[in-house]
Image (tube, rainbow, N blue to C red):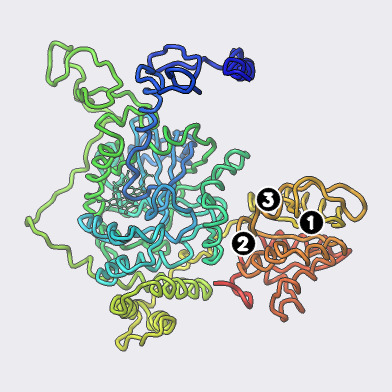
Amino acid sequence: MTTDESRDAKNRQLDGFRAHPEHSALTTDQGVRIDDTDNALRAGTRGPTLLEDFHNREKITHFDHERIPERVVHARGAGAYGYFEAYESLAEYTCADFLGEAGRRTPVFVRFSTVQGPRGSADTVRDVRGFATKFYTREGNYDLVGNNFPVFFVQDAVKFPDFVHAVKMEPDSEMPTGASAHDTFWDFCSLQPESTHMLMWLMSDRAIPRSYRMMQGFGVHTFRFVTDDGRGTLVKFHWRPKLGVHSLVWDEAQIAAGRDPDFNRRDLWEAIESGDHPEWELGVQLVPEGDEHAFGFDLLDATKIIPEEQVPVRPIGRMVLDRNPQNFFAETEQVAFHTANVVPGIDFTNDPLLQGRNFSYLDTQLIRLGGPNFSQIPINRPLAEVHHNHRDGYGQQVIHPGTNYFPNSLGGGCPAHAGAGGGAGVFRHYQERIDGEKIRVRSASFDDHYSQAALFWNSMADWERRHIVEAFRFELGKVESAAVQQRMVDNLGNVDPELAAQVADGLGMTAPTQSRRGSEEVSPALSQENLRAPGICTRKVAVLVAEGTDAAQTDAMRERLADEGAVVEVLAEKGGIVGGADGTAIEVDRALRTAASVLYDAVAVPGGAEAVETLEADPAAVRFVAEAYRHGKPLAMLGEASRLMHAAGLPVTVVDDPAPSQGLCVGAGEVADRVTREFVSAIEQHRFPVRPGMFG
Ligand code: HDD
């Protein structure tokens, strides 16, 4: 084929596309139409590329500039749109318009994130998760920039760069990616006892959430609600997921990081695409100004919670995420959160961590988004009207007419001071009397670093404690410096002697001699045992089949689970169709080799002698069942399928006497219906973390 012929053929291929009225023609940045973006302009078909090809140069130059600096922390994330709906008017406490009327809906954009890893790191690493919400209220944008833990590593923002340097990859090797299990992090924490409470959360299963949709969120700091007439109430914010709070187990999280590094991102995306819109309830803990000092800790200390048993969480509204972004970069990457984006009715306290954040977020966007006009980017633009005298700068999008200073008479005095004659909707700072020396000293009320770390430990179920011990052993086991390990273990001796002894034992070290319990208090609200929710909506269930599977059982199981809102996928050696024992065709959703048990919440295997024989001989199927068991997942084995438990090498006690109370639902023939029922309630429980032979 000659060059011309080949070009004609290509053009014919594309003709349908070009002619389609919905598709606009390719142009340059200047709107000039371009007929070929596949071949650079050249001198002869085999000659050099010509500099005068402005389309080629423009295309490559733009490409060369596509990346912006990633966030210095929280670089990896996923976002979605939705709305917040207030349950009632909170006018008694705040003049915030979006909380002013029952049923008022405010559009939101939420970005979830990990903290340590870069943009391309895995989702399921052990880490804090960011939970940042932008409310596009009628009175301007309000950002609630929180995490899935209610406390933080340091008390003063001036320590933040040190903390981040320590937790990020080490400066010489740039390792490890997405992990805190390394020397610099533990060196820092062992020397910074204020991090102890946060470390308890980080070593717990809260740091490996099953889904962004299944984690709590916290504003962390104590903020302030303010009424129209200037009255303040101290407030802490809580997000509670409708689906309950659920986590992965550590071994599962590590495998998932390889099997699907996008595990949490995909989960959020797919749930929204399929119409299962994730939902959280926003709650507040309200503390009258006069009670600020009524607690045994300082409300300005971000390493402390107010136990829910002391101040109950009052639900004030719900948030639903119902729309995925159209363009990751334009929306999720360019969204710019800022703790100082507050609206009338919401104000700060003197928490030194919050005060520092109020500087940092604006500053970081200037470098990340290339200048001072990032609030003009569509995702950051408020719905409220914007009028000011900020002018020019990189990326200016607005053609501002008229005057650019205040006061002016030539521009009619505009923009004028809002609310000069009083009136609602104007931001007014809470008036607080401050009296103090100019000193670099932290209040003694910030000194207790162990009581609440112990409170967390005391509140955990046995299996949660076991996971915490295992996590400390893993993380500190990765530390090379014995001095750092010992210092950390000694530090844990101030939380609980048993915790310190178990961690020391796992590291082959001596337990601290000076151990004591940091507190005897318990807060049941902290345990995941008490944070489950009814139902199995959106839980993912794998059904393993092969030629000869009992099709009736498969259908019944699939239908029942789907009725309950679960997402069911039928897996077989290959995609397509397999023949059931009675000749009925069973449609396969996914080939086993493209899946893994860590991508599902539960596994079911219908009966059928021939099929079970095939599965027993398939290492991928056997591994699937074994892994699901060892990660504590509900298993339903119908009819002959229970034989797979032998093949999977599960403990003899379990194989001989599988107990539904352990999430092992086994049975044949007429009891299949009961087995399915038990399976549904087992999935509702999520995990069975006390099985014999489990991975921790
Ligand atoms: Fe921060 C990002 C949450 C302390 C400085 N932070 C960032 C994000 C979240 C948090 C969720 C990601 C926002 C997004 O999705 O774009 N940060 C927290 C919480 C903290 C906290 C809950 C403690 C209670 N942060 C903190 C301190 C400082 C920062 C003390 C600095 C003094 N944080 C930043 C930052 C980031 C950021 C450097 C990086 C990218 C960005 O802001 O936009 O400014």
For discs 1 and 3, the disc positioned in front in the rendered view: 1
Seen at 42% across and 58% down, the residue is 312
Seen at 64% across and 57% down, the residue is 596
Residue 517 lies in what quarter of the image?
bottom left
Verify CB contact (< 8 Å) between mark 1 and mark 3: no
Q: Is residue 478 above or below residue 311?
A: below
For discs 1 and 2, the disc positioned in front in the rendered view: 1
- The disc at residue 686 is 2
Rendered location of residue 350, percent (x, y): 21, 52
For the residue carrying disc 3, how many other residues have a C-alpha within 10 Å: few (<14), some (14-19), or many (20+)? many
Say left or right for 358 vs 535.
left
Give the spatial CA distance, label 3 vs label 2. 12 Å
Mark found first going from the N terminus, 1 or 3: 1
Q: Is mark 3 within 8 Å of ligand 1?
A: no
**Which amino acid type is marked by label 2?**
His
The residue tagged with tag 1: helix, strand or loop?
loop
The residue tagged with tag 2: helix, strand or loop?
loop
Q: According to the image, label 3 marks what residue?
A: 566
Q: According to the image, label 1 marks what residue?
A: 545
